């Protein structure tokens, strides 16, 4: 393969260098296109064929169903590591040794207290406020309590910023849910591990002892790992482009949370449960809705099946399906919604229409089922997604700043009116 690509425009030929990744991905570097051609640009709605950066964090091959963080396969990480090990690897580049991991976990606990004035901000929200809006606002508000900008070139400064946000974010998540449910706000316990603390912050009742189900803990740990990063998706790209203006870490994370909120992104697992509720309300006939999904003239969309990136299978779904089965079997949940989900899953795995098109249940389908079985409200599903994605966002923000990437500034093709005269108000 040549090291350059040629482009012909109006009889003129231009050459642009090729960029090759470590997994043999190839891109045409058009950084000089506009200058060389005196104004020509590329247009790529949704940036489906445009690389915004070079990154060493996550490798994703949708055709082959491969997902790796820092070179480690998602299958091995989910089976052998815990969430904070994965977070450390994403942010700092390698899995930690025991000494590094112990320090990391202890430092996160030491920075888990949230200024009590944040409660006053939370109290201003009505119970009806969507948890994602609340979480985004509270994350942005942390800037007021930590006003100093992170010195990205200082390893110590960056480390402290990381443990601070990893320590405080679960508190914000717990408070967001407790506010919605009308429960008192609590802090975690230093004696609990990170995953146990998340559940404690969300579910501890004042009149009973908190008990952690190990199967629930294992499932939540895996879910957070599977959501920790996913290359240059909508929310991650948002974090990077906001950070490219040298906006602070908290402001950039807040923007990422807002991007994740959308039903086409992080809200997909919420959309799955809303679909299941609608099927239940219509009698719960899964065969009827599978037929509607196959009918091109029917507007019904089967949520939680297939993936816009994975053209074969979602490797995360294979992992979390086993955890979902364990959770449902252990809890013995008798829930018609979950029975409908199981019915749809069974149909999709044997129906030639779905099998031939590789429209298998994805991670959003199974994560929604697990969160419902855990007793997490549907409006909190995307908040849990944000909790898992936090390390990836931090890693991407850190990489973008260390690489000294220029401020994001996409171009456009103008399709509006040409120059026209101003008409005085009384003549319009």
Image (cartoon, rainbow, N blue to C red):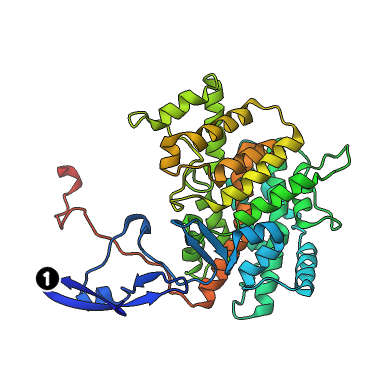
Is 46 above or below relative to 42?
above
Q: Residue 394, image x and y in percent?
A: 59, 65
Query: In the drawing, does residue 55 fall left or right of residue 183?
Result: left
Query: In the drawing, does residue 417 fall left or right of residue 209?
Result: left
Query: In the drawing, does residue 130 fall left or right of residue 48?
Result: right
Q: Residue 32, image x and y in percent?
A: 29, 77
Is 182 above or below relative to 102?
above
For the point 43% across and 36% down, the residue is 352
For the point 33% across and 74% down, the residue is 29
Q: Residue furthest left?
A: 11
For the point 51% across and 65% down, the residue is 59
Query: In the drawing, does residue 39 fall left or right of residue 73?
Result: left
Is 315 above or below relative to 51?
above
Q: Which of these two is toward me, 101 or 63? A: 63
Residue that numbered label 1 is attached to: 10
Task: Indicate the secondary structure of the residue bearing disc 1.
Answer: loop
| Residue 248 visible here | no
Q: Residue 426, image x and y in percent?
A: 17, 43
Q: How many marks?
A: 1
| Residue 210 visible here | yes
For the point 49% across and 46% down, the residue is 262
Q: Which of these two is toward me, 97 or 118? A: 97
Q: Residue 372, image x and y in percent?
A: 66, 36
Position of the C terminus, as image quadrant, is top left
Q: Which of these two is toward me, 351 or 336? A: 351
User: Quadrant of residue 321 in the image?
Assistant: top right
């Amino acid at each position: 393969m040549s090291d350059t690509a040629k482009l012909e425009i109006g009889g003129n030929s231009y050459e642009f260098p090729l960029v090759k990744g470590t997994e043999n991905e190839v891109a045409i570097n058009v950084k000089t296109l506009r200058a060389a051609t005196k104004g020509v640009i590329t247009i790529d709605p949704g940036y489906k064929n445009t690389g915004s950066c070079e990154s060493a964090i996550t490798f994703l091959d949708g055709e082959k169903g491969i997902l790796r963080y820092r070179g480690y396969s998602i299958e091995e990480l989910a089976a052998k590591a815990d969430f904070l090990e994965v977070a450390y690897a994403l942010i700092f580049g390698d899995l930690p040794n025991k000494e590094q991991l112990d320090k990391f976990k202890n430092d996160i606990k030491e920075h888990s207290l949230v200024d009590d004035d944040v409660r006053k901000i939370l109290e201003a929200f009505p119970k009806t406020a969507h948890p994602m809006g609340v979480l985004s606002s509270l994350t942005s508000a942390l800037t007021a309590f930590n006003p100093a900008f992170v010195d990205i070139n200082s390893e110590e400064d960056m480390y402290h910023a990381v443990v601070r946000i990893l320590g405080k974010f679960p508190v914000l998540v717990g408070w967001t849910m407790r506010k919605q449910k009308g429960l008192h706000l609590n802090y975690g316990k230093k004696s609990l591990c990170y995953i146990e603390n998340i559940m404690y912050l969300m579910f501890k009742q004042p009149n009973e002892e908190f008990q952690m189900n190990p199967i629930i803990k294992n499932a939540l740990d895996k879910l957070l790992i599977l959501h920790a990063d996913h290359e240059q998706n909508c929310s991650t790209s948002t974090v990077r482009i906001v950070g490219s203006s040298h906006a602070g870490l908290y402001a950039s994370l807040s923007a990422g949370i807002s991007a994740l909120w959308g039903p086409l992104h992080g809200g997909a697992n919420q959309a799955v449960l809303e679909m299941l509720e609608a099927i239940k309300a219509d009698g719960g006939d899964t065969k009827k809705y599978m037929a509607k999904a196959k009918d091109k003239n029917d507007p019904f969309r089967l949520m939680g099946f297939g993936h816009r990136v994975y053209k074969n299978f979602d490797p995360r779904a294979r992992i979390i399906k086993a955890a979902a089965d364990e959770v449902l079997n252990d809890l013995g949940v008798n829930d018609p919604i979950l029975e409908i989900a199981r019915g749809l899953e069974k149909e999709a795995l044997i129906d030639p229409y779905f099998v031939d098109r590789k429209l298998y249940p994805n991670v959003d389908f199974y994560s929604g089922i697990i969160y419902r079985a855990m007793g997490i409200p549907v409006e909190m599903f995307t908040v849990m997604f944000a909790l898992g994605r936090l390390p990836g966002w931090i890693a991407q923000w850190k990489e973008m700043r260390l690489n000294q990437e220029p401020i994001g500034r996409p171009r456009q093709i103008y399709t509006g009116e040409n120059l026209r005269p101003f008409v005085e108000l009384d003549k319009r």
